[in-house]
Amino acid sequence: MTSINRGHRRLEELRDEAETRRQERTQRSPAEQLSLLDQRLGVGVGARKERDQLASLLKEGATEKKTATRKRPQTESKTAKSRERAKDRRSREKREGKRKRD
């Protein structure tokens, strides 16, 4: 029985392959992607959600190539603002607590 090789080198290879596939996908138009799905899976078979999205893009007349969209990580400014607000709230609560005791 063989085991799955998930060492650092192999994981890096997998990431590179995924990035290559992602770049190739972004270069295809919706019509090209649809025909590729038909070629791989059969006409109208599988990938229903992706096919629906591609069909709506084609219906809208979007022939330009789709750009890759990724969720952006939370920026430092938002995190810093959150920390600052929490710090202000704690100091305000601390001051109000001292006033109530007096």
Image: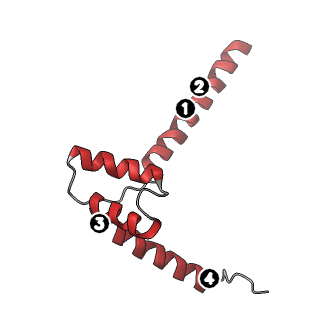
Residue indicated by mark 3: 28
Query: Element type at marker 4?
Result: helix
Q: Is residue 55 visible?
A: yes
Residue indicated by mark 1: 88
Say which label, 1 or 3, has the lower sequence index: 3
- Say what amino acid the circle numbered 2 marks: Arg
Could you give the CA–CA distance between mark 1 and mark 3, rounded to whole angstroms? 50 Å
Could you give the CA–CA distance between mark 4 and mark 1, rounded to whole angstroms? 43 Å
Query: Element type at marker 2?
Result: helix
Query: Element type at marker 3?
Result: loop
Residues at marks 1 and 2 touching, judged by CB atoms closer than 8 Å? yes
- Say what amino acid the circle numbered 4 marks: His
* Disc marking residue 92: 2
Q: Nearer the viewer, residue 15 or 63?
A: 63
Circle nearer the viewer, 4 or 2: 4
* Disc marking residue 8: 4
Residues at marks 2 and 3 touching, judged by CB atoms closer than 8 Å? no
Could you give the CA–CA distance between mark 2 and mark 3, rounded to whole angstroms? 55 Å
Q: Nearer the viewer, residue 9 or 66?
A: 66
